[in-house]
Image: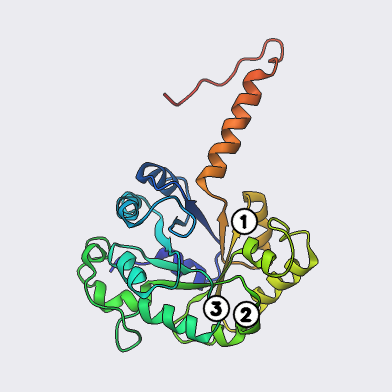
């Protein structure tokens, strides 16, 4: 079976970068797949698309060096199995609030006797290889999102769940749950303390820890803190920021005698 290089690096304590697809475009997924990320996540929770778009996005990612991940919209056993069969090498599951939620996620990601995943890895065999079934339980990565007060309260029980690889923090939902505003994960002490607590408990349980970051600069901070997966915003943010920067550049008066670098694009 094709190795899950993302999981390998994270288990070795190597900080990894994760791209994020919210557009539902196989072309944008392919671009991100070649951009240098260790993994790229197809976001079914807040992305503007459904499974019909997920499949071609996973196909596009499979032709790149990155590891394909899917964030499912909910802890839905059937959907988790479906995207794994489609070739996802990892699952990020929102709103994992207790041990039962974590066990449900693990069961959907693992074949018996560890879990209850039904056999039928149609595209998983094409992407992973003929021996997919023999190694899938070890290679697929399962991350439960901690983003509620209940999840924090039950954090040690969640982290002790056999087969759960780690946790992933949604800082904006976590901020809202703490009574703070979205986007204050680096400035509001309630958020700062909660994120530090989640990371410390994950490390104590020898589990992986990932987090969504608003930018590469924030990602650098989180990597230094010890997170082994940092998501660097999403392609909508990349497009918006770059487009605005180009417009601003075009409207500025160029310095006298300056010669711009020739475009390598269209």
In the depicted structure, whether residue 197 falls above or below residue 189: below
User: Which quarter of the figure is the N terminus placed in?
Assistant: bottom left
Mark 1 or 3, nearer chain start: 3
Q: Is 180 in front, or is 248? A: 180
Q: Is 55 in front, or is 261? A: 55
Q: Say what secondary structure mark 1 lies in.
A: strand
Structural distance between the alpha carbons of marks 3 and 2: 19 Å
- Image coordinates for residue 87, horizontal then vertical, percent: 30, 62
For this orientation, the residue located farthest to the top is 257
Q: Image point 30% across, 79% down: which residue?
A: 117
Mark 1 or 2, nearer chain start: 2
Residue that carries the numbered disc 1 in the rendered image: 213
Q: Residues within 10 Å of mark 1 (few under 14, many from 20)?
A: many
Q: Residues within 10 Å of mark 3 (few under 14, many from 20)?
A: many
On the image, which quarter does residue 8 sit in? bottom left
Asked whether the beta carbons under mark 1 and mark 2 sit within 8 Å of each other, the answer is no
Nearer the camera: disc 1 or disc 2 = 2
Residue that carries the numbered disc 3 in the rendered image: 207
User: Which quarter of the figure is the C terminus placed in?
Assistant: top left
Q: Image point 55% across, 65% down: which residue?
A: 14
Asked whether the beta carbons under mark 1 and mark 3 sit within 8 Å of each other, the answer is no
Residue that carries the numbered disc 2 in the rendered image: 150
In the depicted structure, whether residue 249 falls above or below residue 176: above
Q: Say what secondary structure mark 2 lies in.
A: helix
Q: For this view, does 94 lie left or right of residue 175?
A: left
Q: Say what secondary structure mark 3 lies in.
A: loop
Mark 3 or 2, nearer chain start: 2
Q: Image point 30% across, 50% down: which residue?
A: 56
């Amino acid at each position: 079976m094709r190795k899950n290089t993302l999981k390998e690096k994270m288990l070795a304590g190597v900080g990894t970068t994760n791209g994020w697809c919210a557009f539902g475009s196989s072309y944008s997924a392919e671009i991100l797949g070649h951009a240098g990320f260790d993994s790229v996540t197809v976001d079914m929770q807040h992305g503007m698309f459904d499974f019909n778009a997920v499949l071609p996005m996973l196909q596009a990612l499979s032709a790149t060096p990155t590891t394909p991940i899917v964030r499912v919209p909910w802890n839905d056993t059937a959907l988790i199995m479906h995207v794994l069969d489609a070739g996802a090498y990892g699952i990020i599951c929102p709103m994992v609030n207790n041990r039962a939620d974590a066990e449900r996620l693990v069961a959907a990601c693992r074949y018996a006797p560890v879990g209850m995943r039904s056999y039928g890895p149609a595209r998983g065999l094409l992407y992973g290889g003929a021996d997919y079934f023999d190694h899938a339980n070890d290679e697929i990565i399962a991350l439960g999102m901690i983003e509620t007060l209940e999840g924090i309260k039950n954090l040690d029980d969640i982290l002790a769940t056999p087969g759960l690889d780690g946790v992933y923090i949604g800082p904006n939902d976590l901020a809202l749950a703490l009574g703070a505003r979205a986007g204050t994960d680096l400035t509001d002490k309630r958020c700062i303390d909660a994120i530090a607590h989640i990371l410390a408990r994950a490390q104590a349980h020898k589990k992986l820890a990932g987090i969504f970051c608003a930018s590469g600069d924030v990602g650098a901070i989180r990597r230094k803190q010890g997170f082994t997966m940092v998501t660097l915003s999403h392609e909508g943010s990349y497009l918006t920021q770059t487009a605005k920067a180009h417009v601003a550049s075009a409207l500025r008066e160029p310095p006298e005698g300056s010669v711009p670098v020739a475009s390598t694009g269209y």
